[in-house]
Image (cartoon, helix red, strand yellow):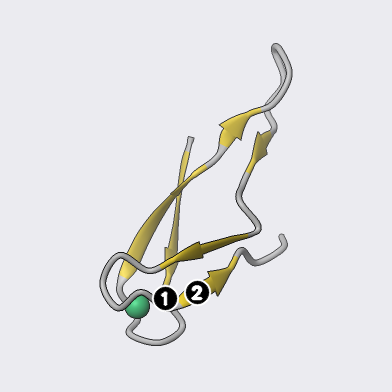
Amino acid sequence: MDYEYDCWRCWETNCVYGEPKGFLTVWYELPGEWSCWNCGAINLTPDD
Ligand SMILES: [Zn+2]
């Protein structure tokens, strides 16, 4: 499952891949932080 987040620095859209967790559950584990493909800034995954 991919989630789209905007970089805080350049506002470029990044796709963050969430690892499926468990079996038959609709729950995906997202990395706590990821770096922007465009500018390399470290972004924190926002909590819902
Ligand atoms: Zn960026």
In the rendering, at what x and y percent does residue 41 appear?
Answer: 42, 78
Locate residue 48 relative to residue 30 in the image: left or right: right
At a point 32% along the width and 85% down the height, the residue shown is 10
In the rendering, at what x and y percent does residue 31 appear?
Answer: 61, 51
Report which residue position mark 1 lands on: 7
In the rendering, at what x and y percent does residue 15 appear?
Answer: 38, 53
The amino acid sitting under disc 1 is Cys
At a point 30% along the width and 78% down the height, the residue shown is 39
Distance CA(mark 2)–CA(mark 1): 8 Å
In the rendering, at what x and y percent does residue 25 appear?
Answer: 72, 20
Give SS at disc 2: strand
Please, which residue is most extreme toward the top here?
23
Compared to residue 24, the image places residue 46 above or below, namely: below
Question: Is tag 2's residue or tag 1's residue first in the polypeptide sequence?
Answer: 1
Quadrant location of the C terminus in the rendered image? bottom right
- Is the residue indicated by label 1 positioned so its CB lies within 8 Å of ligand 1? yes
The amino acid sitting under disc 2 is Ile
Report which residue position mark 2 lands on: 42
